[in-house]
Image (tube, rainbow, N blue to C red):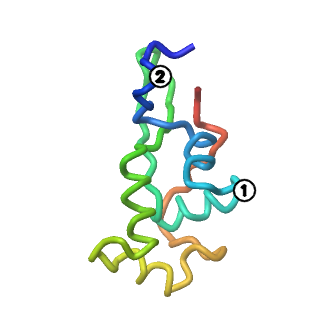
Amino acid sequence: MSALPLNIPPRCLTFEQACEYVGLTSANTFQKAVDAGVFAAIPYKDRAGIRKTVFDRIALDKALDELGGLTNDDDMAKRLLRGKINGRAQRGKTAVSHRTAQH
């Protein structure tokens, strides 16, 4: 149960929550978008030193705005045109596995 009031959505989302938030039904497709740099993960360690990964809800909104052409930033369009999402993740980037995301 959340301590937040119902009218305040959480800012940090787990991998599964972020996948659902952006409307993707496939975790694999969402992972490819993360690998391509479309959606950025935020790695951190909790108080117990356990590595976790979250996604900022506002950053997800910004990325979706860029994908939808709602901003002047065409960097996202350039990445998409180079085919970075369709199974060809950018080399040198570390994949963020949804298995490491903790609730």
Measured from the top left, where is residue 93 in percent x and y?
A: 48, 63
- Return the residue at label 1: 26
Q: Quadrant of the N terminus?
A: top right
Measured from the top left, where is residue 42 in percent x and y?
A: 41, 43
Measured from the top left, where is residue 39 in percent x and y?
A: 47, 58
Instruction: Name the image quarter holding residue 15.
Output: top right
- Return the residue at label 2: 6
Out of 96 and 8, give the one closest to the viewer.
8
Q: Is residue 86 left or right of residue 59?
A: right
Out of 74 and 71, give the one closest to the viewer.
71
Element marked by disc 1: loop
Element marked by disc 2: loop
Mark 2 or mark 1: which comes first in sequence? 2
Q: Tell me the kind of residue under disc 2.
A: Leu
Q: Quadrant of the C terminus?
A: top right
- Among all residues in the image, which is located at the extreme left? 72
Out of 92 and 25, give the one closest to the viewer.
25
Q: Tell me the kind of residue under disc 1.
A: Ser
